[in-house]
Amino acid sequence: MMDLFTEIEEPERKELKALRKELEEANYKYYVLNMPTLSDREFDEKMHRLQALEAQFPDMFDPKSPTQHVGSDLDKGQRTKDKGQNGKGFETVRHKYPMLSLANSYSREEIEDWVRKLPSGAEIVCELKYDGLSISLWYEHGILVRALTRGDGQQGDDVIANIKTIPSIPWKIERNDIPAFFELRGEVLLPWERFEALNKEREEQEEPLFANPRNAASGTLKLQDPREVARRGLDAYLYYMLGEELPGTTHYERLETAKQWGFHISDAIKVCKNVDEVMAYIAYWDTERKNLPVATDGIVLKVNNLAQQEELGFTAKTPRWAIAYKFPAEKQLTLLKEITYQVGRTGVVTPVANLEPVQLSGTIVQRATLHNEDFIKSLDIRPGDHVWVEKGGEIIPKIVGRDNPTPPLPSREGDGFTFPTVCPECGTPLVRVEGEAAWRCPNEAGCPPQIKGKIEHFVSRKAMNIDGLGEETIDLLYRQGLLHNIADIYDLRLEDIAAQERLGEKSAQNMLAGIEASKQVPWARVLFALGIRMVGETTAKKIARVYNSIDALQWATAEQLCAIEDVGPQIAENIVAYFNDIRNLEILERLRQAGLQFEGEAAEGPQSDKLAGMSIVISGTFSHHSRDEYKAMIEANGGKNVGSVSKKTSFILAGENMGPEKRKKAEDLGIPLKTEEEFLEMMN
Ligand code: IVH
């Protein structure tokens, strides 16, 4: 009897475990890697199913289940270190009040139900649901002292240096009517315009694009370089004030107060008295939100009266006094007319869907990436199918499936989709490296888009920054036989350029001035400009710090290269292969003759080896230098700055208010602390 019983239960218990695993993974990919794999709706549906199963099998309760905690954006120093990368560099701090999430609803009926269950006459504040990432700002005596990400809801990363780059967030409030401590929570966003500009730049650099402004904002906030953060142009909207001695008895009053204190509070907030007013608000913003400068994905409803909020209280993960209504993702069915193939600078062949144009979230969509062969096969789509195109929070339209069944569908066998076997641009047989999803054209030196792409990358802003040599000009000079590789740039003569139609003497002179100026571009950027596969801007900087000349780098073995932070076996192999190719050596020699910087300035490499082999944790606040400056100092003296304390830590550079957890861990492991002054003395 018992056996029979367990057998019947088994599949559902299995499903429960599988769902926990899937949702844990989805949380990690969403919050830590900024690469969502499930849509919000799919995530919520799976979460509901898991909740139902957990209710059915109370004996399987687990406090670690994703139903019991919010996802975490904490940088897992350990996890990244395992991959040979640096840990984080942010201090993890416990929230004064847990940072919860909101219950989601997808239908107006659910909203009506929620409103009906509230105490009669309860006022409801309607707000837009901003689609960025939440931040908690701490003000002590009017001074911004911390800016914490949500983290796992209990503790977050302090990203204050990056938050201070947001012009609308005050560093200091000079008033005498503010409490000694208060906290403001809100959403950090990358406005659409900035997001599109950033992705355009990344496309030019062949860096992976951000799927939506939320991922871009999240990636930006975790950068270790506040100057780059400032350049990207984040913004923030604040929507929740917390603290002990706060003014007002309603949520709305508090937001009004925050506005008077100089905080950026949305103008779209409305106090509603009944469900009809709420519905009118939702209907209005469902269309009007398309004209906003930032992404929104729904509406948030909050009980206005704070005493009523307190009565309603919280569940483990969400307040009962608030709920979110999510706008439906827009989806359209359209014909997949043709699949074409694009060859990038590194030879990767990307399939592109050419669609019958459809209107989606205010734009016409006619092309969408199909990523690679596996993606096409997993959706089982081919030209002639009707496919679903979706554009929710994702600005980049994506194909999410095919109409099932595609009419008429006698049999899909026999005429299945096949990926091309030769390069669509130059006819060379394609190769697929084991373990990689992409097919690649190996004809680096003879395939036109690869040749032009490498030159475009070389002249781009973050590389050699040569003005006047844009995509069209490169194409023109390539077709005229004047540009075949990056070294040819330095052989261009005024008369050759000026003789081209559309390029007068003036633009020829500008171009030559840009080429001349590029000879001063520092070694790290020259290395990035060479376009070695997978050697991005940051990796190039790290390599150039260790190998401060091309001659030194040229002889490095893969094993030696792997010792550099951020350089894994694949990148190391790519570098070695680059220097093993005689064609590259010829080009490098010509570039050397042209006078490019093939050596780093002294400041770029380690200035001393005083800290060689040491792992140093920085914690707390400092008065002589910023954290970033200390980090640079550590690296310049051969040390490594790591995020979390372990038995391998050499010492902790401890400022004021060092995190209590770090202090305890250091004590437990017997790791020494050095004050700022002691450290500076050590550095002389
Ligand atoms: S209130 C305790 N208001 O949505 C409730 N959240 O899905 C605190 N969000 O973590 C949140 N706009 O990051 C609130 N007007 C708004 C919001 C908002 C966006 C985000 C926030 C929260 C998430 C929950």
Image: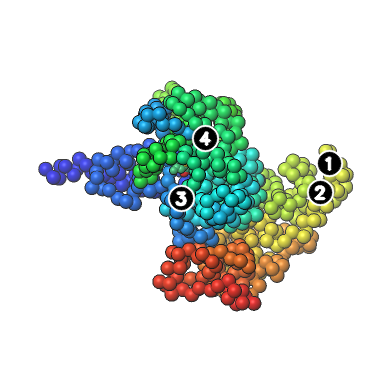
Q: How many marks?
A: 4
Amino acid identity at mark 4:
Leu
In the rendered image, which residue does mark 1 sit on?
503
In front here: 210 or 300? Answer: 300
- Counting residues from the start of the chain, the first of labels 3 and 2 encountered is 3
Amino acid identity at mark 3:
Glu
Q: Is mark 1 within 8 Å of ligand 1?
A: no
Camera-nearest label, 3 or 2:
3
Answer yes or no: do the residues labelled 1 and 2 have beta carbons within 8 Å?
A: yes
Instruction: Pinpoint residue 363: horizontal percent, then vertical percent.
Output: 59, 29
In the rendered image, which residue does mark 2 sit on?
511
Q: Is mark 4 within 8 Å of ligand 1?
A: yes
Q: Is mark 2 within 8 Å of ligand 1?
A: no
Relative side of 156 to 165, left or right: left
Instruction: Pinpoint residue 273: horizontal percent, then vertical percent.
Output: 45, 27
- Counting residues from the start of the chain, the first of labels 1 and 2 encountered is 1
Answer yes or no: do the residues labelled 1 and 3 have beta carbons within 8 Å?
A: no
Camera-nearest label, 1 or 3:
3
